[in-house]
Image (spheres, rainbow, N blue to C red):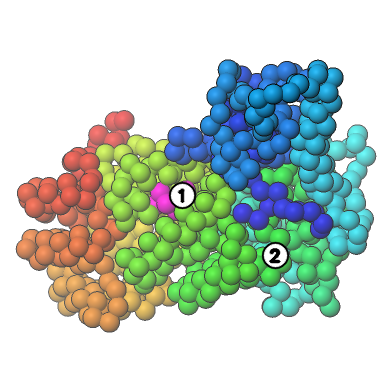
Amino acid sequence: MASPQTENSNSVKTLVSWKEIAAFLNRAERTVKRWERERGLPVHRVPGGERGSVFAYPSELADWLNGKDGELEADDPAPAGPVAGQANGQPSNGSGTNGSVKQRGAPSVETGSTPGPASRRRTLTAVRVATWLVPLALTAALLFYFLVGHPGPRVTAVGDRQPSSAAVPALATDSVAVLPFANVSGDAGSRYLVDGITESLIGSLARLPQLKVRSRDAVFRLKRKNIGPQEAGNELGVSVVVSGRVTIEAGKIDVSAELTNVPDNTEIWGKRYTAKVSDLIQLQEQIVGDIAQQLRSSLSTPDRLLVVRQGTQSTEAHTLYLKGRYTWNQRDRANLEASISFFNRAIAKDPEYALSYSALADVYSVLPFFGGNPSEDFPKASNAARKALELDPTLAHPHAILGSIEMEYDWDFAGGEAEFRKALALDPNDATAHQWFAENLGMIGGREQDALKEIELAHLLDPTSLIIRRVKGSVLVAARRYDDAIAVCRQLLDENPTFNLAHDCLGYAYWGKRMYPQVMEQWRAYFQHSGNRDEAEFGGAMERGFRSAGWHGALTEGIKALIIQRQTGYASPYKIARLYADLGDKEKAFEWLNTAYREHDFLLKELNTAFELDNIRSDPRCVELVRKVGLPNTPPPSAAALAEK
């Protein structure tokens, strides 16, 4: 992970092992472990990680050292040189009482006099000064860098607008939305940069403690609405809104940012920044640092460093990353594949850019839903997510990606749940992680109540998210609560007529109720506007079959369309199997279910809950398949039983 650094200093990395922490403090590992137990040494554990998985921030260690000179010297004197066995990066294996190491770094002397107490004190004082001043100096440099700003004219802040202290409301806000910054230049080629500033602010502020930050999808839905900060804040359900404007011209970037208190529509802070485009990273760090100070004035130094960091100090890598995010957010097959190129180029510029690996994992994890091959894309997503966590163990989102992949593709349901819980331990306010967790719990069977709880949490955290409400409909369908699902998705469609996935949701709910004309009505609308050629062909085939031979004809023609698609690309064998099952052809259904098992079709997680398989669920072959996939042996959910709960 490339940590923030001053122009003339080496980068300061997060310490990610006991060995690195001990080397930083110039002590033995057993000593620093004891200091953590007995003296509160600030060492963090990776939530849910392997035993012994720890990390620490140099700035926190330096703060902890301050003022403890005497007591620590008496407890465990610093060596005159590097800790024995650690000069080459290896831990010391010396022994001693209370975790100390005898004669660390001192030569073995058989004859001659021992230095007197005064001489020994002088040596220790010099070593202690050298040992502690280095980390303190690094902390001071980082504090100057982030609290005061970069030296020289790299980022200029002008026009700091803030009312008198008597007029400023106490900002004990628990929720904030960053509205899409306006592209004043109007240059289409600058959209990626302007949207990137907004998206980076959202990601950075989400690291602030006890603060709910509305998602990118929620705020960007308002981009085309001509509404002010107060109306936007009320619609998003937040108490503070961040808004701004960006002008890019002749290699210069000018950013104006404001904070608006939503209840009384007052501007409580504003500032204008000017910098070279080549200094974009420093500009973003300055802006997020200033806004974080307004939202959390008592923010600790370590928390501030965590919030402001952009993940790289390479402007080229950061620019490629922003272009990748902009392209990824278009959410179609061509743009998803183009974003992969941008992220890989960003990694080539900075191989330790953890956010680029996380973004790469995002792309590969959704490609199977856009015609990609799960057996190729999911493993790539998993590898990229694990690399991101290797570089930065404090990231939450890669854990959520791994949670989905392990439950959907690896069929490691316990491992996937553990990954989701790691993600939510690191970022409890991640609505998307709650949404993904809910969707997977709802599909595997026996966890319907947990799934509904998670999707409600996601909705509370991001009440304007359309996809969260759509997933709630899916969870209700899996729980056989078809009428509730119809109510949720009907309201979603009424309020958002262009949100196509609401039609898909209604189609499945009506299918569960065996209301076939309504199924075809909703799917006709969905498939016509899906933007996916394969889905359009499948929908057209079902429509033709339904007109000629009713539901039986729709299923038959749908099967034919999927089998043809498999001749030139990928089509889910599980989808073919469930159509055969609903058609009543058990042998063909099991033939394709076995194919789905061989291909590791991620939709097999629905074996316990899919109503389409009710005709074959009692067959011993289905019971055996459930066992092989590793799903719980549980009967399909009963809507009546769930309602009683």
Classify residue 599 as left or right of residue 226.
left
* Residue on which the image places disc 2: 314
Classify residue 310 as left or right of residue 46.
right
What residue appears at the point 55 percent right and 46 percent down from the top-left corner?
Answer: 393
Q: Residues within 10 Å of mark 2 (few under 14, many from 20)?
A: some
* Residue on which the image places disc 1: 400
Whether pointer 1 and pointer 2 mark residues with C-beta atoms closer than 8 Å, the reply is no
From the viewer's perspective, is the residue at label 1 or at label 2 nearer? 2
Q: Residues within 10 Å of mark 1 (few under 14, many from 20)?
A: many
The reply to whether the magenta stretch includes residue 290 is: no
Tell me which amino acid carries mark 2: Ser
**Where residue 254 sits: x, y (%)?**
83, 66
Tell me which amino acid carries mark 1: Ala
What residue appears at the point 37 percent right and 54 percent down from the top-left corner?
Answer: 405
Which one is nearer the viewer's eye here, 561 or 80?
A: 80
Dominant secondary-structure state across the stretch colored magenta: helix
Which one is nearer the viewer's eye here, 246 or 570?
A: 570
What is the quadrant of the C terminus in the image? Answer: top left
Q: Is residue 618 above or below residue 21?
A: below
Q: Secondary structure at mark 1?
A: helix
Magenta range: 399-404
What whole-number distance in Å separates the C-alpha atoms at marks 1 and 2?
A: 27 Å
What is the quadrant of the N terminus in the image? Answer: bottom right
Looking at the rendered structure, the number of numbered marks drawn on it comes to: 2
Rendered image quadrant of residue 39: top right
Q: Is residue 588 above or below residue 160?
A: below
